[in-house]
Image (cartoon, helix red, strand yellow):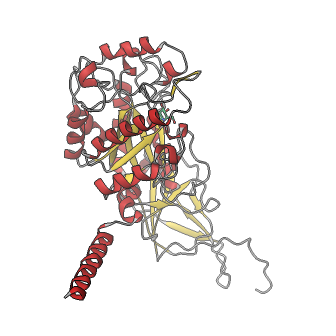
Amino acid sequence: MKYLKIILILCFLTIHQVVGQEKELSKDQRLAWFKDAKLGIFIHWGIYAVNGIDESWSFHNGYISYDDYMKQLDGFTATNYNPEYWAELIKESGAKYTVITTKHHDGVALWDTKYSDLNVVDKTPAKRDVLTSFVKAARSEGLKVGLYYSLLDWSHPDYPNFLRDKKRYTDDAKRWAKFTKFNFGQIEELTKFNPDLYWFDGDWEQSAETWKAKEIRDLLLEKTPTTIINSRLQGYGDYATPEQGIPITKPDSKYWELCMTMNNSWGYQPNDTNYKSVNQIIRILVDCISMGGNLLLDIGPKPDGIIPQEQIDILKGLGRWTNKHKSAIYGTRAGIPFGHFNGYTALSKDKTILYLYVDNKPNGPLLIKGLKNKVNRAWVVGNGTKLKTNVVGKLYWSDVPGLLYIDVPEDVQDQDVTVIAMQLDGEVDLYREKGQVIESN
Ligand code: FHN
């Protein structure tokens, strides 16, 4: 009888183990949507919009006193806050996901956290949780939802760092333990929004051990098993997050996302009118796509919830291009190496369609070198015009491909970036040698 009991327990444990393992998704499975998404909209919204100054850094760097910075709490009204309109606008831009700041380094939470009264419900005229309604609105637009959370909190009495030149303490394990308990408490509260993505920030101030980064990761994957985590968890994240500066060479990480401002500010700063043009932003998106990455483009709403007109115009302008060129954006993969085409390229997921992105008015036919494949068909994406391809200089006995030319009539070109698609006779196959000497003819 005793042995039967042991056998039954062992069977139960094994089944539990197997079921447990089945439930755990692989990294590739969890990040599949992210790899196909290509475009997301970042939202930096907080009290820093009231004076239109740098988020959190302005008091940390001493540009303004902490007390004066916190006086902005009184100006965060959200009176014209319309989360449904935000979600609609983000959807119209062609973004597949959105990431909103739930709490920046200044510690002001945008939801009704029970771990601190430093939140917009208790401390601002908004007097309400502005996060829940946005998450709901974004989901109803079919957008994936990411939650930005700053691990560091320069306002918390038990957090060691305060101002650039003023610490609260250096080595006090008891206080740090209290802060860690607070941090885990707020992070656990955020799991209740069942986010598709956690966008951590501020991890640079402590080590992985000090943050308990592994425990944070385990908690998130336990509570939200399908979620993904950005890199800023001291090495316990899933994908790389270059910021502002566009990578020149393809990042090593299979999964990556460039986050970037529309002007030079993350939050709303009326004095910062240095906006990039729609054309520049489309070409930056194409640059990311050609290297197999995503663009997370930032907006900074005003304290009443209105999105500045310049940012609305950019989202709508981006939407015109993304809506017209869907097939050459979502689900594509990194393009062919430089040297074959004087411009950006991308490939379809099965690598049988090669996309060429032309961000200028060509003076002659486009040239593709070293393409071994036969091109079965070429067309203008979003326009449908079929294009003739013409190969010159192909010697029948040589395996060096000829020069492939494609004429793109002016009237089918896009005002920003024209996209040419080429259906190949199979997976892309490139000649990448140094040419050869002709020994016979
Ligand atoms: O310090 C923050 C900054 O304020 C902003 O939030 C950006 C967005 O990625 N992240 C940090 C700087 O790396």
In-front residue for pair 291/71: 71
Of all residues shown, which one is farthest toward the front? Answer: 2
Spot occupied by residue 355 in the image (x, y as percentages of width and height): 47, 60
Q: Quadrant of the C terminus?
A: bottom right
Spot occupied by residue 268 in the image (x, y as percentages of width and height): 40, 23
Residue at the image point whose x is 61% and y is 55% from the top: 342
Residue at the image point whose x is 33% and y is 71% from the top: 21
Residue at the image point whose x is 61% and y is 53% from the top: 249
Spot occupied by residue 132 in the image (x, y as percentages of width and height): 22, 37
Q: Is residue 94 visible?
A: no
- The quadrant in which residue 238 appears is bottom left
Count the numbered circles shown. 0
Q: Is residue 1 visible?
A: yes
Q: Quadrant of the N terminus?
A: bottom left
Residue at the image point whose x is 30% and y is 69% from the top: 20
- The quadrant in which residue 109 appears is top left
The image shows residue 371, relative to residue 72, as above or below, that is below
Spot occupied by residue 230 in the image (x, y as percentages of width and height): 44, 49
Q: Is residue 245 left or right of residue 331?
A: right
In-front residue for pair 338/306: 306
Q: Is residue 216 left or right of residue 343?
A: left
